[in-house]
Image (cartoon, rainbow, N blue to C red):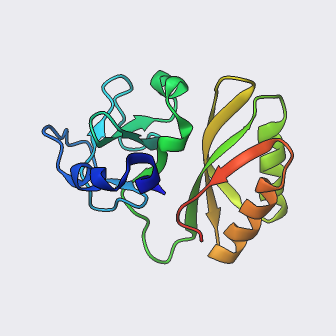
Amino acid sequence: MILQILGKSDKKKLLRKPRKIIPRGKVRIEGFEGMTYRFCKTCNPRPGDLIIGYINKSTRSITVHRLDCRELQHLDPGRMILASWGGSDEGEKKEVKVIVEAEDRPGVLKDIATVAASKNINIKGISFHPRSKGKSIGIIIFETPNLESAQMLLSEIQGMESVSEIRDSSIH
């Protein structure tokens, strides 16, 4: 998926270390575990913030943004990738972090929350921001007992009329 965006020849360049890394906490970038990354200077993400990675073709690097970063409104959602702070402890429920693109209208978040509540799945974090053309994009972190529950939840949300896309690379 990422290679389609950058092209095969750019993969080696993407894997190189950026020149300057600001230590702010360990970031896990879905599909790029162990890679180096940069932090957006505009939003200055800190541990605990909801974050997202963005593949920058011109610098061939990944930039980590806060989900409420104003720069995200101008970036291509197809080049956004899941990112989170550190990992989860064993024995805890599974956290599933998804990127959702939906209509920007009253009630969309209520509809998603109602589906989660009907399956007894907790929402640990949620952040949505308007995009262009009546759409909004956001990250939702669900706490599920297992992957089967998460798959059922995401399938039902994807089937909602107001949801145009839901992405989660940890569930296949």
Residue at left offset 83%, top offset 55%: 159
- Drawn side of residue 58 relative to residue 119, left or right: left
Foreground residue among 136 and 57: 57
- 106 in relation to 3, above or below: above
Numbered-mark total: 0
The residue most toward the left is: 19
Residue 56, image x, y percentages: 36, 37
- Drawn side of residue 162 relative to residue 137, left or right: right
Residue at left offset 75%, top offset 25%: 134
Location of residue 21 by image quarter: top left
Residue at left offset 26%, top offset 35%: 59
- Drawn side of residue 87 relative to residue 139, left or right: left
Is there any visible trace of residue 33 in the rendered image? yes
- Drawn side of residue 143 relative to residue 110, left or right: left
Location of residue 97 by image quarter: bottom right
Foreground residue among 90 and 61: 61
- Say which quadrant the C terminus sits in: bottom right
Residue 139, image x, y percentages: 59, 44
Residue 8, image x, y percentages: 34, 56
- 71 in relation to 3, above or below: above
Residue 169, image x, y percentages: 53, 62
Residue at left offset 41%, top offset 35%: 65
Foreground residue among 48 and 167: 167
- 114 in relation to 61, above or below: below
Foreground residue among 43 and 33: 33
Is there any visible trace of residue 146 in the rendered image? no
Location of residue 45 by image quarter: top left
